[in-house]
Image: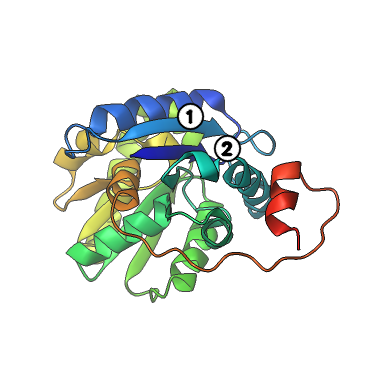
Amino acid sequence: MRILLLNGNTDARMTERMLRLAQETLPRLGLTHVELRPATARFGARYIASRTAAVIAGHAVLELVAEQAGAVDAIALACFGDPALDAARELAGIPVAGMADASLRIALGMAPRVALLTGGAAWVPMLEEFALTRGYAPERVLVRAVTPTGDMIARDPERALDLLAEAGQSAVVEGAEVVVLGGAGLAGLAPRLAPRLPVPVLDSLECLLRSVVAPLPVPPGPGRTPSTGLAPALAARLAP
């Protein structure tokens, strides 16, 4: 099974890091038949930390989906917040899983109240809205963030672990029964945080891998319409 591991951030080092962590995770999940093909957004923010950056990333994601969907069996959108997830599903014609969407479904399958824990305060309202759009009420999903952004955490995880543990403990006091470490920059930290919290700690990258190999619905394709100024592969997907 060929899976496109698509990073909506433009930091190629982050893509390489996620690819390495994902390849280490696949055997543990019994997914030795999976071949990962990495891709990094060609334009936009190095690491998404605002609504504007997320919208721009959505365009970059759709360009790569249009170009590469025909060469893979499924797409793993490895960018927490899942920019353009529903549009990517519409466009791709193959299964597409999103990191945040997969994490929420798996966590809420384990417990009625969960916490999304990420880096960067700007993500709190964005992820709260994301959870609502997926049909999850605020009382089911607590969103908490530490001050360092995800790329800062990836560069210096040791400094972030105490902050993440404190935020996770606070979420547990508020009723969270599962904590999700969300974001590319936090991938791989769940095993180190888990001993410091009294509830299960999930890694959003692992949730993504588990989800993308499961049967996922493929919605009808996009409406055909003339377009202007789009990359050729994306324009072709939309052409009447």
Q: Which residue is mark 1?
A: 15
Q: Position of residue 111 (x, y in %)?
A: 19, 66
* Left or right: where 219 falls relative to 194: right
Measuring from the top left, give residue 79's x and y in whole percent. 49, 44
**Looking at the figure, which quarter contains the C terminus?**
bottom right
Q: Residue furthest right?
A: 228
Question: Disc 2 on helix, strand or loop?
Answer: loop
In the image shown, does 210 or 146 lie closer to the viewer?
Answer: 210
Other residues around mark 1 within 10 Å, as few (<14) / some (14–19) / many (≥20)? many
Q: Where residue 98 sits: x, y (%)?
A: 43, 53
Tell me the residue at 50%/53% (across/down): 82
Q: Nearer the viewer, residue 122 or 69?
A: 69
Left or right: residue 21 versus residue 191 is: right
Q: Nearer the viewer, residue 83 or 167?
A: 83
According to the picture, the residue beneath numbered tag 2 turns out to be 9
Residue 38 visible, this angle = yes
Gap in Å between the C-alphas at discs 2 and 1?
A: 8 Å
Marks 2/1 in contact by CB < 8 Å: the verdict is yes
Task: Find residue 114 and report its image quarter.
Answer: bottom left
- Left or right of 21? Residue 10 is right
At 28% from the left edge and 54% from the top edge, which residue is drawn?
A: 214
Is the N terminus in the top left, top right, bottom left or bottom right quadrant?
Answer: top left
Q: How many marks?
A: 2
Q: Which residue corresponds to the image point at 14% horizontal and 39% vertical from the top-left? A: 195
| Location of residue 18 by image quarter | top left
Question: What's the amino acid at mark 1?
Answer: Thr
- Would residue 154 be found to the left or right of residue 39 on screen? left
Residue type at tag 2:
Asn
Q: Residue at 75%, 58% (x, y): give it.
A: 239
The image shows residue 102, relative to residue 166, as above or below, that is below
> From this viewpoint, is residue 144 visible?
no
